[in-house]
Amino acid sequence: MSYDSLTLNIDAKIAHIQLNCPDTLNTMTPAFWRELPEVVQHIDREAAARVIVLSSTGKHFCAGMDLSVFTGGALTSKQELGRKHENLRRTVLQLQEALSQLEKVRMPVLAAIQGGCIGGAVDMVTACDSRYCTEDAFFSIEETKLGMTADVGTLQRLPHLIPQGLVRELAYTGRRMYADEAKQAGLINRVYPDQATMLNDVMDIAAQIAARSPLAVTGCKEMINYTRDHSVADSLNYMAAWQSGMFQPETDMMETFMAKAEKREPDFEELNKMTSIFD
Amino acid sequence: MSYDSLTLNIDAKIAHIQLNCPDTLNTMTPAFWRELPEVVQHIDREAAARVIVLSSTGKHFCAGMDLSVFTGGALTSKQELGRKHENLRRTVLQLQEALSQLEKVRMPVLAAIQGGCIGGAVDMVTACDSRYCTEDAFFSIEETKLGMTADVGTLQRLPHLIPQGLVRELAYTGRRMYADEAKQAGLINRVYPDQATMLNDVMDIAAQIAARSPLAVTGCKEMINYTRDHSVADSLNYMAAWQSGMFQPETDMMETFMAKAEKREPDFEELNKMTSIFD
Amino acid sequence: MSYDSLTLNIDAKIAHIQLNCPDTLNTMTPAFWRELPEVVQHIDREAAARVIVLSSTGKHFCAGMDLSVFTGGALTSKQELGRKHENLRRTVLQLQEALSQLEKVRMPVLAAIQGGCIGGAVDMVTACDSRYCTEDAFFSIEETKLGMTADVGTLQRLPHLIPQGLVRELAYTGRRMYADEAKQAGLINRVYPDQATMLNDVMDIAAQIAARSPLAVTGCKEMINYTRDHSVADSLNYMAAWQSGMFQPETDMMETFMAKAEKREPDFEELNKMTSIFD
Amino acid sequence: MSYDSLTLNIDAKIAHIQLNCPDTLNTMTPAFWRELPEVVQHIDREAAARVIVLSSTGKHFCAGMDLSVFTGGALTSKQELGRKHENLRRTVLQLQEALSQLEKVRMPVLAAIQGGCIGGAVDMVTACDSRYCTEDAFFSIEETKLGMTADVGTLQRLPHLIPQGLVRELAYTGRRMYADEAKQAGLINRVYPDQATMLNDVMDIAAQIAARSPLAVTGCKEMINYTRDHSVADSLNYMAAWQSGMFQPETDMMETFMAKAEKREPDFEELNKMTSIFD
Amino acid sequence: MSYDSLTLNIDAKIAHIQLNCPDTLNTMTPAFWRELPEVVQHIDREAAARVIVLSSTGKHFCAGMDLSVFTGGALTSKQELGRKHENLRRTVLQLQEALSQLEKVRMPVLAAIQGGCIGGAVDMVTACDSRYCTEDAFFSIEETKLGMTADVGTLQRLPHLIPQGLVRELAYTGRRMYADEAKQAGLINRVYPDQATMLNDVMDIAAQIAARSPLAVTGCKEMINYTRDHSVADSLNYMAAWQSGMFQPETDMMETFMAKAEKREPDFEELNKMTSIFD
Amino acid sequence: MSYDSLTLNIDAKIAHIQLNCPDTLNTMTPAFWRELPEVVQHIDREAAARVIVLSSTGKHFCAGMDLSVFTGGALTSKQELGRKHENLRRTVLQLQEALSQLEKVRMPVLAAIQGGCIGGAVDMVTACDSRYCTEDAFFSIEETKLGMTADVGTLQRLPHLIPQGLVRELAYTGRRMYADEAKQAGLINRVYPDQATMLNDVMDIAAQIAARSPLAVTGCKEMINYTRDHSVADSLNYMAAWQSGMFQPETDMMETFMAKAEKREPDFEELNKMTSIFD
């Protein structure tokens, strides 16, 4: 598989997705919107890795929506207005769904961000599991400055990540938030002097995750996703139902005991490829 | 397009999907599970019709899950148990999602049921908008008799359709409910002496729906789906947001006034084909 | 107080609101939309009655939205489209809120329906507590026939009142449902040969309600409203918090015991007028 | 174990709980409130049966709360009012929880009702899975007539069982609903000429349930309970997690196939007694 | 319009509401409770500004509930206890609703806080969009120290703004939290040396917001409010419905492009005054 | 009462629960799982204190689940797999419920943590109201390192306490988080140089809480718990119902005024022991 807007490298159970159009500031083109969900779903379906790192190239992480998207079919057609709006609604849902793949994939996704992370790029990184950035990174809900309300995830996910009063100031003004403020606010786990150092460390974290039982890790991701959107009581109940099928102390847990006794790293089976009754 | 488990005919804006394996009692084979969502999504995406009629052939509507499904990959593989269960969970979600297409498609789906509607077939028809049946029709949550809990929609949707105390008796015993009881309970809108009469009348109802503004009708479907799962307050609020985009009195409503004045049937534009930013 | 679209009579703790524009089929004019919530809130605030009967005059109960509403400001102004739609959203919310007063008022509201109950009138009666009708009554979700999606309550409340499959058929086709079908479906509590008989009996039921403790009755209404929109567990918990303040066995319950012992009707205090910290 | 307010007989995997104080109309005394949850939890914990039948003795099923409850500690103490109310809230929660055991027990509960089912008895039977009654049975939300709002389940569960407009009329007036109306409304599954005939048939239904896989049946109960209080999407997702652990085609399902081939009844293992890490 | 408890100045599309009873520490008097919602609703209805700044005068921002409120009608009347409690419940709802106007108004509200922000004042500022304060500011959930549970918003909104463990300590002890801790906890966006500096900067932020499309900004506010109370999936779906009506790239977005090309500030239309069908 | 895994001391209305098996690192043994809920429920039922401090002995707070738990009945029995999983589900629910007592008890629970807080101990302290720790404290979601998904509360409660991106990194890697990071993230209210200093200060905070009206404090706890799991609108409404019963200005509030006037500490009544209708 080869892609126009990004590259995919899988090594040591870590999938590295890298935006690779630095000349156009990695804006989110139609190709990007098609390829990102495709590559994420591929990794998920094939259980091709145990963790995903999402990074970028060039001075800036991503400058947000490519203007060509706004000149596409849904927005500029000369249709009856009701139908046009129905179509616009579906288009927004499609764009949201593309980014939601980062949340739905069974493996954790770590975003490594340098320079500008602007507009749609904020929507994207808030759908990742954890975020890391360089000292020169900055974030802006640029949509407000373009006269529109951000619509593909920022306003839905950022309030779960940083204090509400700050979300609101950022959304209403469209001002930039720099790395330090983002770290202090909780959006960012760690700040690094430069991209190389960042990628090095993020790969280390990814390697730690890849060394764990992928079934235990995917259980964590499912539960944290679920908890965000349900009551604690419902989430505990869901956990118990999940565990009734997934917790097998005689395999993964026993392997950790034996590995410890034998002073070696534990060796876990991969998650299943997603076999389908439909094939 | 040609299908193994069903046929599709579109005429006068009515799509007729018909199960056509009467010799095997139209059991739900892997081919069926692949084709049903495919054909429904096709109609949705292409706005190929304004309403869907789902019927069947032979003495019985559908005898439920084909046994070959239970001997497929997810259930019989010799894997580590935790991974096997994780895979089983995903398989159940896939099967559910296949039937949920009937609920998610923008057009109403009317089910016309003759003879036995058994096991998975109950899951299927409860995902349709409305149900009609012949006098000899009967329904059974057969899964209980097979030693399993029905898992692809019946227990989630039937309690919204008939009295709870009856749902429970049917689910726990697995007994048959015949047409009369099903009608009285509210599962069935109308009972007919035979299949030909039924299809004739259901096509009439479909024709009435096809004569309405497809945007108004899809709005109704979206709202009724939404209301089932949300509070009335949330549903009213959603309605108002929806209406802000979709209600265009100067087109569809004006057309109904003009048609009335001119003593003709109103003529509405179709819904949009689902254009995609991704293409 | 005097009203253009309706009359209000309060007698024996029963408030009778009657639509009184039979010549225009009691369509819902701007005056109606202003006056209905006003009169309902007045009864609520003043604790002016213990139960409300909503009836109408002439051959038909109510023919739905008056066309003058569609030619009002929100729909026909020549504004920037986004602002116009924001305004339309708020207008829909206002109309919904007007009818929701029937649900929010502390006293039960019984609707007595003769002849046609059409379009917006269905939205209105589904917001009442219970419905009664004459043999010649019929109901139609007329909006679909006018090229629009009903937006002021029918699609949100009717699915809580009658079987889903029937709601959908009615909404998609816009066909009429007559008294018998409405009774069998559960929309209507009782059917009467004519309006006089109906009003007589509905007043009897109202009188029974007016004879009960108004605090006990308003507790029932609050709980049934709440339960519709929350889980049983949440509803039980809310009940217990409510009861901690409202249940006073030494007053109302004791009065029922004493009245029984003394072979007289119990005599309960009225609910409080809604005093306000703001005045 | 021996009880004051009821008897327990377990035979052929059917537990029969019978209220046995006909002389006092089986009112719900402190002994009843202590014993009912105790006996239900015992059956659950010990997996002592596969289905429960709840019936009564004498002319009337149950006349509701015994007046001695209202003269107990929480209501009559001379405490600081805030603490008294806090205590009252907890008492209501305790009473609710006692009846909720009927809903939470892993086995279905079938209620067989003769004569009067009054006040608290309605709260009780609405917490059962299914209800059956004799021709002379009647139901009344008597609390309203006693000057209080019913607070232990009726207003939370009845709206899930019968049409809303009818619930409200019954709650506000306190009038009786007789067997025929209750059957037509959906509260009752079947009406019988007398108690003996009823018990005979209900035992037959119980026997059918007891012949099924108890794991499949308890899965049905859990799912129907869950669905009432969650969205369909959440309920489908919960089903899939549940099934990942509970669906074992190689045991119960295989047994049904083999039993059929061998022309015998299938033989399923009981549910586990609830072993505890705490013991 | 003139007010007793506050002043309103509107300039450059910024509405400045200022509490102006420094001699009584700006306690929340009946006049305040009447005037605050009135002035906020006025701005909303008339689209009289694009952003609101809420500040105060004197050494302290606001000392919370004026004692005269506790001696008002609902609390001291000599009524039957049940009715008195029903009335108290409605009074609490009214007070809550008064502060909730700050959340519901279409424009962002920025609170600028000096000195003490005590009791009811904390309820008030947590209903604002963002908070700014001076170095000498402090916050206390004073209600606990007065022997009551805070009941007009603090316990409902503060847990969305600062860490839960801190909320609980503050609520249970009633201790003061000073500016530094409040900033670090996320309650406060920025701390200033004195009130003049604070007001200057907050007005700058308000000016930035006033320079944006008011339709884009109100969309942000609606979405952030909505997201706090709904799942991410529901919130994304709501966003898409909203956007179908509100997103008009040919007006506001195009204006930002043209303004940039012409090196000027973009010029956006105001939101609509809230026209009403009822007038 | 005497316990094996902990000690209970009640003094000056503060209950001090202390884990006291330092030699085995206070691992969570079957005795612990039985005794912790027992002692917490005892305090609750008897209103034996106004606040609870949970601390530990030895170098480490608690090393998590004792391995003997994993070798108990539910996990190692040789049963039919479906029944075994059903049993496992119930065991997980039991363990969760044991820790949830810390959340449900009417009194605040303050956790004072030294050294390692590992695995199940994180589940435990996240169920407490507030957390305090020594400089050498560290936290780890150790379960992931043992090949399993944490299942008794960490993944459900921690996301409400610290930034989501950090929760995820901790859960996926199983790495340690030290006191400083935990304080900055919001998990910990205050960090102390050593355990003695910590206990001294936590007892001071507990004493402040014990000096408040216990009814006001329990109202705060109930509301903060409730708000976490419900919308702000629902939470405000619940608050108003609660307050209608619990707010008694003439007792606790009046006492605070009088105490102030008389320059003494206010003296409040205890909460009620939980009397039961069942006894």
Image (cartoon, coloured by chain):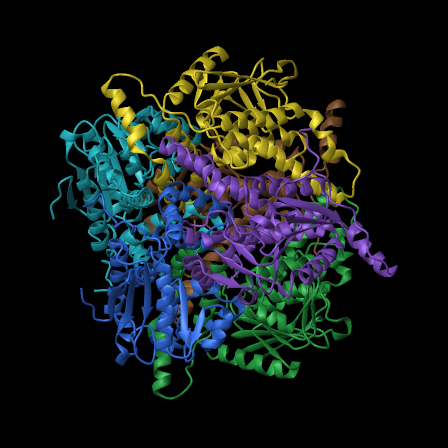
Chain colours: A yellow, B purple, C green, D blue, E brown, F cyan
**Residue farthest toward the bottom in the current orientation of the protein:** C263
The image position of residue D83, as x and y in percent, is: 29, 60
Point 46% across, 41% down: residue: B70
Residue D89 in sight: no
Q: Nearer the viewer, residue A24 or D122?
A: D122
Q: Nearest the camera: F263 or D193?
A: D193
Task: Indicate the position of residue E88 as horizontal and vertical percent values.
Answer: 43, 62
Which residue corresponds to the image point at 40% horizontal and 38% vertical from the top-left? F160
Q: Would residue D162 be visible to someone looking at this image?
A: yes
In the image, F261 versus C243, the foreground residue is C243
**Left or right relative to E262: residue A60:** left
Quadrant position of the C terminus of chain E in the picture: bottom right
Q: Residue at x 35, y 70 (%)?
A: D120
Which residue is painted at 22% across and 54% down in the image?
Answer: F47
Q: Is residue B225 left or right of residue F31?
A: right
Q: Residue furthest left?
A: F2
Closest to the observer, A183 or A9 = A9
Query: How many numbered circles are shown?
Result: 0
State whether residue D130 is above or below residue E203: below
* Extreme-front residue of the structure: D262
Q: Locate residue A103, reporting x and y percent.
A: 50, 32
Query: Is C222 displayed left or right of D28 in the figure?
Result: right
D246 relative to E253, above or below: below
Q: Residue A247, position in %: x, y?
A: 33, 35
Q: Quadrant of residue C119?
A: bottom right
Q: Give the answer, above or below, for where C255 lies relative to B46.
A: below
Placement of C220 over or under A250, stated as above or below:
below
